[in-house]
Image (cartoon, grey):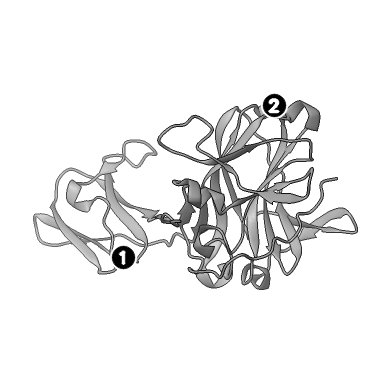
């Protein structure tokens, strides 16, 4: 049975509030050192390794298994300018998204997200890895199951608004099938992101005159919009309507006029604008 993490003392006051689509890219050694690895062998906290997976241009946080029970990457108020703790409910954060690395996925029994609220840990479903190297890990606070520990047993838990309003730790656990076999094998974390709600926005199509169509929609801050067109109503074949209707952002309503031509279908693609945690500095 895996042991819950101990509560890590807060080192500094949060400088920024949690907000949707904030991502930690671990672009510097200092940013990485402000996250923590929980050592199940010693019960202590250490800093992750930085840029050790391949030494490339897209660095990450990583570590290797020791003789303990697993590896846990975690953030608290000292990490990433405090953007991964605090009031997730008020910020409208709905889930988590990150890239995870396993040098040898066959050694990994499961990977899971965890949250800490008021001294109680909550865990996502244990997820399995299908391949060595990098994988995408995503999970919702509201549409997928969570668990906590009562009397040493995992039981169902509901992630309530109260829990999401005050999170003091968040992170990812890796657990091996056999500890002895996994010792020295590397696991990693990158692009840890707080996911928010992507709103549905209608694309209005109106007859401007005998020769033109008017396409318009309302915009919201923190999102990028692209109008796409297709001659068939199929899954494939969609392309941006024009450079002028690609990667639009802002808060003002958008409208464009296009010539009426052969039959076309239009759709509006909405993507969040991710905010990378800046270099924390010395």
Residue 199 in the image, given as x and y percentages of width and height: 43, 62
| Residue at which label 2 appears | 106
- Give the quarter of the figure containing the C terminus: bottom left
Please tell me whether mark 1 or mark 2 is closer to you in this view.
2
Q: Between 73 and 200, which is closer to the camera in this rendering?
A: 73
Name the quadrant containing residue 103.
Answer: top right
107 lies above or below 42: above
Residue at screen point 77% across, 45% down: 40
Q: Is 127 situated left or right of 138 in this image? A: right
Instruction: Tell me if residue 143 can be seen.
Output: no
| Residue at which label 1 appears | 219
Q: Secondary structure at mark 1?
A: loop
Residue at screen point 65% across, 60% down: 169
204 lies above or below 50: below
Badge 2: residue crowd in 10 Å (few <14, some 14–19, many ≥20): some
Instruction: Tell me if residue 92 can be seen.
Output: yes
Q: Between 115 and 186, which is closer to the camera in this rendering?
A: 186
Q: Is 257 situated left or right of 265 in this image? A: left
Residue at the extreme front: 282
Q: Is 7 situated left or right of 165 in this image? A: right
Residue at screen point 26% across, 40% down: 231
Badge 1: residue crowd in 10 Å (few <14, some 14–19, many ≥20): some
């Amino acid at each position: 049975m895996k042991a819950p993490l101990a509560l890590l003392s807060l080192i500094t006051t949060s400088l920024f509030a949690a907000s949707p689509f904030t991502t930690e890219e671990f672009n510097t050694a200092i940013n990485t050192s402000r996250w923590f690895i929980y050592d199940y062998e010693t019960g202590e906290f250490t800093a992750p390794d930085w840029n050790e997976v391949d030494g490339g241009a897209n660095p990450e946080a990583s570590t290797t298994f020791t003789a303990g029970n697993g590896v846990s990457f975690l953030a608290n108020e000292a990490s990433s300018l405090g953007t991964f703790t605090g009031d997730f409910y008020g910020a409208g954060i709905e889930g988590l998204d990150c890239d995870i690395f396993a040098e040898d996925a066959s050694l990994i029994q499961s990977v899971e997200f965890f949250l800490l609220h008021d001294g109680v840990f909550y865990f996502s479903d244990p997820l399995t890895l299908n391949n060595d190297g990098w994988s995408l890990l995503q999970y919702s606070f509201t549409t997928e199951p969570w668990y906590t520990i009562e009397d040493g047993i995992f039981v169902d838990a509901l992630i309530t608004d109260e829990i999401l309003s005050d999170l003091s730790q968040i992170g990812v656990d890796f657990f091996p099938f056999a500890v002895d076999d996994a010792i020295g094998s590397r696991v990693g974390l990158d692009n840890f992101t707080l996911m928010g709600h992507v709103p549905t926005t209608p694309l209005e199509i109106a007859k401007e005159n005998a020769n033109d169509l008017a396409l318009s929609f309302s915009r919201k801050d923190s999102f990028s919009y692209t109008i796409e067109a297709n001659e068939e109503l199929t899954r494939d074949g969609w392309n941006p309507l024009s450079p002028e209707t690609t990667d639009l952002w802002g808060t003002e309503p958008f409208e464009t006029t296009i010539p009426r031509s052969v039959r076309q279908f239009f759709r509006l693609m909405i993507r969040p604008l991710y905010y990378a945690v800046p270099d924390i500095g010395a």
